[in-house]
Amino acid sequence: MKLDRTIRRKRKKGIKVLGTVIIFIVITIVFVAYVFPIFWMGVTSLKTKVQIFDPVPKIFFKPTMNNYKTFIGTAEGGEVGAGRAGAATSFIAAMGRSILMTTSVTLLSLLLGTMAAYVLSRYRMPGKDDLMFVILSTRMLPPIVVLVPISLLFTNIGLKDTYIGFLLLYTMFNMAFSVWIMKSFFDDVPFSFEEAAMCDGYTRLRAFLKVVLPMVKPGLAATAIFCGILVWNEFLFAIVIGTRKWVFMPPTIFTMSYGAEGIIWGVLAASSLIYIVPVLVFVYLVRKNLLRGITFGVIRG
Amino acid sequence: MYIMSMIRLVNLTKKFGKTVAVKNADLEIEKGEFVVFLGPSGCGKTTTLRCIAGLENPEEGEIYIDNELVNDLPTLDRDVGFVFQHYALFPHMSAYQNISFPLRAMKHKKSDIKKEVMKVAELLRIDKILQVKPSHLSGGDLQSVALARALVIKPKVFLLDEPLSTLDAEFREEARTMIKRIHMEIGSTTIYVTHDQMEAMAIADRIVTMDLGEIQQAETPENIYHNPINMFVANFIGSPGMNFVDCALEGKDTMKLGLDGKTLKVNEAIAKKIHSTGKESNLVMGVRPEDLDLNMKKNEYGFPMEVMIVEELGPENIINLRSGDHTLKVLTDPHIVPKSGETVWVVPDQERIRIFDKETQVEIL
Amino acid sequence: MGETTKRKKTRRGITDKQLKYLFLMPCIVLLVFLILYPLIWSAYLSFTDYRAVQGRFRLFPGLVKEKPGVKQIKPNAVGFKNYKDVLRDEYIWKHYRTTGKFVIFSVLVQSIIGLGLALLFNREFKGKGIITTLILAPMMLSPVVVGMFWRYMLEPNWGVIDYALNTFFGLPRIEWLAHEKTALFGIIIADTWMWSPFMFLFCLAGVSAIPKYLYEAAEVNKASGWFMFSHITFPLMWPLMMIAMIFRTMDAFKLFDIGWGMTQGGPGFSSQTVSMLLYRDAFLSSKTGVSCAFAYILLILIVALSNIYIKYLLKARAR
């Protein structure tokens, strides 16, 4: 024991500095490891075909905007995949559809989810726990399981490849998350606020809109982020249900990056990069709420 | 040279950024002493305690535990037991696991561990609740578990950071007596931090009063009470606190008081002492409420004041007096009940008058 | 709770009860329409030999107008044949094994990395906020794209990973996605890059919730290094870490996008998960009836597993 003490005593002084340096190095390595692929994607998007297939990957090279021109559709001799069979599509159009669908679904999920969550938070009712369970379990389903019958259903009803069809489908799958997070936030707001408001003459509805809702803004932000990202990046439903008209960006990137000889990496990189930018910007804007939302929503769930 | 002290602080200074929490502290604590660090919030008492434990690293100065310089010694190698203000018990462990924690960390044998834990648990009378987790324990039990955990390693030095502050008032007296009893039974050297001067007076062998990072006076409770070294100490100790009145010596034996020009006759000893320091004005007179008598008749060795409120406490009364903007408190026997608005003469016990420089030292005994 | 017993009706407002139904209905309608109904229909189909290419059929004929020129058929009932075929199919079982392998490996690796990162980041340093936010970036990408791009990076001839391994560490260039044995690991690498930040977040939340004074108490009580970690840090952060692991496991089981983008299940079917196979059978081969049976078996499996998970979750919360 005595020997340990003297060793520890001597070490205490020097080890502090060394430890800090090592930690600094490791953090840097970690940071690079996670950011590098995105950085590399950016680099790749500026390369010509020849540069891309160079066995010695270079960071410094003569950049070209050709891939981006292909994205917009103005490349000279630029190579691009055929896209979905029979579907005339372009990146820009697909991007537009993605933006539209994402915003619509996010708003609708927020609306329906918040409403349902409020009721589940405030009211007693028979079978409430079961209902919660059913709603939450939709998240556990592998989407493919539901996709098979829904695909048939939509075809029969005429919802396949339609705006409404996608809107309903994506909203449904966002409900679990939306309800879950919003309910946690509502549970945190004591009912006394609504009581006070109603004593002042507010109706239940107005109390909800004017008093409670503003207090759960972080929850709304977190939900919006998750629902938005989910729809923005969704692939499977998009390729199954969106056959001709409603082709979104992820399937478009996928199909249009396949050229005659394999994947056209430059185009893939450029289109992917452009597609990430809105997400990164959005996340940056709400970054303070993000951490809270992720952990908080799940802890309380 | 053989040094007897168990704990020694030499010129200890601890800063937090620009703030100096502890300034040039010098202190020696003997083996087996029960020392109380006393002072208001932010005076540096907890910081000093933590420096001794090794939870803070001082900027300057040395700390010796049992004649060993421990500045560079990490906390876990110092032979101290520490009780945190809010106990800091591990919430996911039972009482037994909490108490046995240091022994397990030191890799003692399981059978030894059980023996030691049971010994301490019986001493603190918590042997029946050892399987319970902290979240289900009462305040008193929590404190006992915290004490047990600190004591199970039989430390040379026992440090407690305001251990009673989280207890309900009715349990505090009992708890502090228990702590003193344990200290005496184990024969440890104990440092106890508190802001409650009554607590300190009750159990300390010596009180170390601190203010703004500096040690003011480190002596026995009696000394501190009767011979406070400065106005801070005089004011802090005692309840109700000492009365202070501005004064100046006039002539051979008269003090002019800052109570609208009233005067007080003082005896020779006091006058001579003041005279010898050369400073005869800008003084403050301090007298404790229990050292003041009330007279109905005019008395040269007293001064008149108006009675405001009489608080009858049972064993004694507190008479609140007023003169202009100044107030004074007098502690009397319960049968003295002057009427509100009456004028009475306040006569201080000359032996007990303290004189301070307007903000530093005592002069007269 | 929240329910007022008086049915107070104000002049212009709606009653409590009306509000309750108004708010809850859309959600329930969606649920019934898009989950319940398809599941029932799918159950029906699983007992037939229906193949979507044969033609359409109406579950409730006459309910919706039938398009002219579209072939209407009535599917044949085949009893439990589909289920038997699926359960006996070694090909399908191989896929379950592949999926299981993927889940175990990826969740384990991601958990360890997540834990390590959380311990690393559990201190103050300059730029902590920005770096932490940026590390979340991988989770924000479309998994298909991630899969596709990692394919580029893992290519032996022009990929940056092999180049780095070769030049800096002298390792041979590995053909990740060309070999059956390593293809799945390629996917695991990409998935780990994408999702270990998720584990990291949760572990960090768990670790940073531990109050500093507990560490001080441990230090004062002779704990250091490994003992401190195993007795203080880990037990107190475990509940959150476990929740994250459960989430990751459930999600990993569903793997489709990243794998499809990277290998489409290849080479052969060595990196094909259950979801990918189901997709192929249902939509590329149009084996609709069989797929429904397949999907149902998968569903039952997931529900069973989820129940176990939920029980764990509730236990963890109770602590």
Image (cartoon, grey):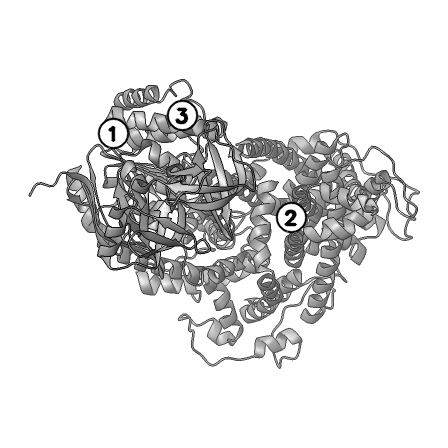
Discs 1 and 2 lie in a common subunit? no
Q: Amino acid at mark 3?
A: Glu
The answer to whether residue B360 is left or right of residue A91 is: left
Task: Decide: few, some or many residues near mark 1? Use Cα within 10 Å; few <14, some 14-19, many ≥20.
Answer: some
Q: Answer whether residue C298 is visible to the viewer in this image.
A: yes
- Residue at 50 percent across and 75 percent down: it is A47
Residue at label 3? B174
Q: Amino acid at mark 2?
A: Arg
Q: CA distance from mark 2 to mark 3?
A: 77 Å
Kindly identify which chain the residue marked by label 1 belongs to: B
Helix, strand or loop at label 3? It is: helix
Kindly identify which chain the residue marked by label 2 belongs to: C
Q: Position of residue C142 (x, y in %)?
A: 59, 58
Kindly identify which chain the residue marked by label 3 belongs to: B
Q: CA distance from mark 1 to mark 3?
A: 23 Å
Q: Answer whether residue C53 is visible to the viewer in this image.
A: no
Task: Name the image quarter holding residue A89.
Answer: bottom right
- Residue at 30 percent across and 25 percent down: it is B182
Q: Position of residue C150 (x, y in %)?
A: 50, 60
Discs 1 and 3 lie in a common subunit? yes
Observer-nearest of A109 and C53:
A109
Foreground mark, 1 or 3, reads: 3
Q: Vertically, is A52 above or below B46?
A: below
Q: Vertically, is C101 above or below A57?
A: above
Task: Name the disc covering residue C280, or none.
Answer: 2
The answer to whether residue B201 is left or right of residue B259 is: left
Task: Decide: few, some or many residues near mark 2? Use Cα within 10 Å; few <14, some 14-19, many ≥20.
Answer: some
Residue at label 1? B154
Q: Position of residue B27 (x, y in %)?
A: 22, 46
